[in-house]
Image: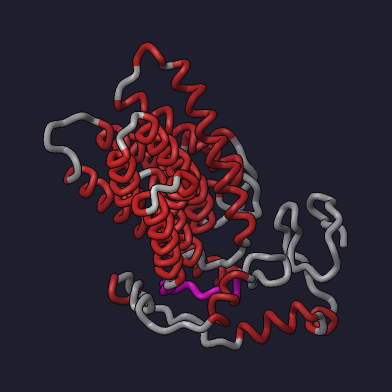
């Protein structure tokens, strides 16, 4: 099946072009439904869908966290985003999702970290140290990322793609940041640090979402969170290793603890906001450089830079209360953009 938009040759049975996201018109749905994968997807989809609510109240959004969930529900979440399982825009629900899987992932990460901690602290086995640093660094950023993945109502991004963005996007954004730091080495301060790191993440996020395949606000929010999660985790692992090399084992645990507690409102949320703002201004249009100077994008990007600069500002008594305030402020904007993303889906459903 050759895409009429980008001439990419796709396998038979896909709903949209794997390369550019162009939607195909189905001429023989019966053939698709006979495939084993489609039968499995249909069966899993019979599991009661997550109840949704229009009001973004915390008791509504997080109401399913403490309920029992079957493995079938988790399996249904993990098969979304492929060319065969991505729903049409008319099938997408434009009310508030109720995520729950992120909480289970956090518990699993805590159990793994506890195991590594016992191995290092109680048994004194240095072989457990790399696992301690890796799991400790990734636990909270990945948990926050899973939350954004569950909030991606279009369900058009597969989990393997998210893992790819975390690893490649995380290291790429760090390398770009180092380039900016080298350029600004004579004027390093909280403001230039904020500019360098947020600009590096913005460039990386835009490189992933500039194609029309990821054109929704919620897509930008998710891809941005993936880049930010990679950046945050790799950075935390680096600081933890520095603490270990300094000979202060207690400082290693303190570094992982505090950076883990503050991770949801730092790099993950900031990169998510940048990605959502970019997708909001680009929409269905091809990428153009003038998109980056539009007011709706710049106001979010400058807000992110400002919050990052305030985060790093060495004000007496700032830590941790100032960071807590910035986390709350970041997530207020996150929820506002989630609302805008759901509204966007509602408008597209009407036009479809």
Residue 57 in percent (x, y) is at 29, 71
Instruction: Kindly identify the residue that appears in the image at 39 percent across and 29 percent down.
Output: 195
Residue 109 in percent (x, y) is at 43, 61
| Above or below: residue 160 compared with residue 279 | below
Magenta stretch: dominant secondary structure:
loop
Name the image quarter holding residue 172: top right
| Above or below: residue 178 compared with residue 221 | above
Name the image quarter holding residue 160: bottom right
Instruction: Kindly identify the residue that appears in the image at 65 percent across and 54 percent down.
Output: 213
Colour treatment of the image: secondary structure
Instruction: Kindly identify the residue that appears in the image at 75 percent across and 52 percent down.
Output: 19
Which sits in the foreground, 256 or 92? 256
Instruction: Kindly identify the residue that appears in the image at 84 percent across and 79 percent down.
Output: 28
- The answer to if 94 sits in the magenta stretch is yes
Q: Which residues are magenta?
A: 88-98
Q: Residue furthest top?
A: 186
Q: Seen in the image, is 318 located left or right of residue 96? A: left
Which sits in the foreground, 5 or 322? 322
- The answer to if 263 sits in the magenta stretch is no
Residue 226 in percent (x, y) is at 51, 50
Residue 229 visible, this angle: no
Q: Name the quadrant of the N terminus.
A: bottom right
Q: Seen in the image, is 173 located left or right of residue 241? A: right
């Amino acid at each position: 099946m050759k895409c009429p938009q980008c001439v990419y040759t796709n396998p038979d049975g896909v709903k949209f072009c794997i390369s550019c996201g162009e939607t195909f018109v189905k001429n023989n749905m019966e053939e698709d439904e006979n495939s084993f994968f489609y039968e499995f997807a249909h069966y899993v989809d019979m599991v009661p869908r997550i109840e949704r609510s229009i009001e973004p109240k915390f008791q509504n959004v997080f109401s399913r966290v403490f309920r029992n969930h079957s493995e079938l529900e988790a399996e249904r979440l993990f098969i979304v985003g492929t060319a065969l399982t991505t729903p049409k825009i008319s099938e997408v629900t434009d009310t508030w999702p109720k995520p729950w899987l992120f909480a289970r992932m956090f518990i699993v990460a805590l159990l793994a970290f506890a195991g590594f901690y016992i191995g290092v602290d109680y048994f004194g086995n240095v072989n457990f140290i790399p696992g301690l640093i890796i799991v400790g660094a990734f636990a909270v950023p990945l948990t926050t990322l899973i939350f954004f993945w569950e909030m991606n109502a279009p369900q058009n991004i597969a989990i393997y793609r998210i893992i790819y963005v975390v690893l490649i996007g995380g290291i790429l954004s760090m390398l770009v940041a180092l380039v900016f730091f080298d350029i600004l080495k004579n004027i390093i301060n909280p403001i230039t640090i904020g500019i360098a790191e947020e600009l590096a993440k913005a460039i990386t996020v835009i490189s992933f979402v500039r194609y029309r395949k990821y054109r929704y606000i919620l897509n930008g929010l998710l891809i941005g969170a993936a880049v930010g999660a990679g950046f945050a985790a790799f950075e935390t692992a680096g600081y933890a290793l520095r603490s270990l090399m300094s000979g202060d084992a207690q400082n290693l645990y303190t570094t992982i603890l505090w950076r883990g507690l503050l991770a949801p409102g730092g790099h993950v949320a900031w990169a998510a906001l940048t990605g959502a703002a970019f997708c909001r201004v680009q929409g269905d249009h091809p990428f153009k450089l003038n998109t980056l100077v539009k007011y709706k994008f710049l106001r979010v990007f400058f807000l992110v830079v400002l919050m990052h600069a305030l985060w790093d500002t060495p004000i007496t008594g700032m830590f941790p209360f100032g960071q807590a305030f910035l986390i709350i402020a970041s997530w207020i904007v996150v929820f506002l953009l989630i609302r805008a993303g759901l509204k966007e889906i509602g408008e597209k459903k009407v036009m479809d």
